[in-house]
Amino acid sequence: MDLQLLVALVAGIATIVVIVLATRLDAFIALLLASVVTGIVAGQDLLSIVDSITTGFGDTLASIGIVIGLGVGIGKILEVSGAADSLARAFLSAFGKGREPWAMGTVGSLVSIPVFCDSGYVIMNPLARSIARVKRGGYVTLALALGCGMTLTHHMVPPTPGPLAATGILGADIGSVILAGVVFTICLLPVVVIYARWIGPKLEPVLNAAVKHDVYGSVTTASADVHSTSGSVDTLTGDASTAGQSSATDNSPTDAAGAAAGNDGSTSAKKPGAFLGFLPLVVPLLLIVANTVSTAIDKNAQGELSGDAYEPSAWVAPLAFLGNPVIALIIGLVLAVYTLLPRVTPRNKVQNWLADGAASAGLILLITGAGGSFGLVLRESGVGDALAEAIASISLPALLVPFLIASLVRLAQGSGTVAMITAASVTAPLVAPLGLSPLVAVMACTAGSMVFSYFNDSYFWVVTRFAGLDGIGAIKGWSGITTAVWICSLPLLFVLDLIV
C-alpha cells in the first residue's frame, strides 16, 4: 500500500481515538476532523474535502435519518406507556419457572430493538430484582442475562441506530440485515444464558452490599407475610408493591405507564397488554421482511438477481412501498401512539414525549452523518482502493477487516455505535473491490463492536451499578459476557459469508 495513503488512514482513525479519549469533543466532531485530516494527508484537494464531507453527510442521512427518528419515537412511547414492562411479564409467563435467565435474555433482546439499552435496562431491572427476591438468589445471573440480551439486538438488529447506520453506509438491504441480526441473536442467546449461569453464582457472594440489601434484605423479615399472601409474590409479575421498595441505588425506576397517566391527569393508569405492546414492534418488522422476501422472489422470477435492471412487478410494488423502512416505521409509530397510550392523554404530552425521543437521537444522527462523510473522504481520496489492494494481497479473510476495525475502535473509545459507524465508514470503499457482501460487512461491523465492554462504555456502568458488581467482579461478569458473544459471533460470520 502507498505509504502516504496508509499514513492517511492511520492518521484518520488515530484522530477519532485521540479526540474522543483525550479531549472535550465528542465523536461527531472527531469523525469530521478525521475526514479533514485523512483528506489532507492523502493529498486530496482542500475544496473537494469539504465537498466530500457535506455530500457524504447528506447522502447518509437521506437514507436513514428519518428511520432513526421514527425508531426512537416508537421506543419512547413503549417506555412511557409501560408496554415494555408488559412484554417482559408476558415472556416470563411463557417461559415458566426455572427458565428465568432465558426469559430475561429474550425479553432484553426484544425490548432493546426499539429502546436504547440504558433506558431499557433501567425499566426492566426491577423485574429481575423481584424474581431474584422471590427465588432468594440468582440476581447476578438474571441481571447479566437481561443486559447482554439487550446488547445482542442493540448491536445487530435495525432500527437500532448502530446497525441501521452501518446498513446505510455500506448499502446493505435493511430487510436482510434484520433477518441476519435476528438469526445471530437466536444463535448467541444460549451463549449469554450459559455464561450468566456459570459466572452468576461465582459473583453472587461479592454482590455489592447495598444492592444485596435492596434485592434480598426484606426476604427474611417478611418471609411469612410474603408466603401468606397470594402464594407469595408472583415470580411472573414481581410487582414492586409486594416485592419491596426500590432504593436510591435503583435511581428509583418507576412504572412508566402509571407515571404517564398520572402526569397527564388521566383517569386510568392501566398499562397496555403484551399483544398491543407487540404491534408497534412486529408490524414494521414484518412489513420490512415482507418487502425483502417478495423482492427476492420477484428478482429470481425475472432472472435479475443482481438488481441492475430490476423493475418491481405489479404485485410487489405495494409490498415494496409498505415495507420501505420509512413507511413501515411511520405505521409503527402511529400504532404506538394510538394503541398504547390512554385516549385521555393530552396531545401536547404525547408531542413532548416524541420530542424527547427525537432529542435523544440527535447526536446519533450527527454521528451517523459524519460517519458517511468520513467514508466518502476515504473513497474519494483513494485510501479505500489502496487499502483494498493491500488487503487483497494478504491471506486475511475480507470479513475480518470490518470485524477487527470495529473491535479496535470499541476498545479504544467504548461506544459500540461509534465503533460500528467507524468500521462501516472505513470498510465501505472495500466492499466491491474485495467481493465482500454488504450484508456480511454490516454483520461483521456489528459483531466486532460487542467486544469487552468496560470502563469507557456508559452501558458498562448502567449494568454493573444495577447488578451490584464492582471492580474485578464487574470485569468478570459484564466484560466477560460481552467478550464471549463477540468470540462466538465469528463462526456465524464465516457461515453467513459462505451462504451469501
Image (tube, grey):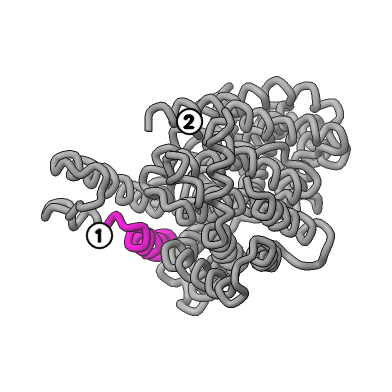
Label 2: which residue?
186
Residue at coordinates 50% horizontally, 31% vertically from top-left? 493
Q: Secondary structure at mark 2?
A: helix
Q: Nearer the viewer, residue 143 or 319?
A: 319
Q: Which range is magenta? A: 321-341
Relative horizontal placement of residue 442, taking residue 282 as reference (left or right): right
Q: Position of residue 231 (x, y in %)?
A: 60, 29
Real-space CA distance between mark 2 and mark 1, rounded to the nearest whole angstrom: 29 Å
Closer to the camera in the image, 370 or 366 = 370
Q: Residue at x 25, y 49 (%)?
A: 307
Residue tagged 1: 321
Q: Nearer the viewer, mark 2 or mark 1?
A: 1
Amino acid type of the residue that numbered disc 1 sits on in the rendered structure: Phe
Q: Main secondary structure of the magenta part?
A: helix
- Look at the image and say whether residue 322 sits in the magenta stretch: yes
Residue 372 vs residue 366, the one in the foreground: 372
Q: Position of residue 456 (x, y in %)?
A: 78, 49
| Amino acid residing under circle 2 | Ile
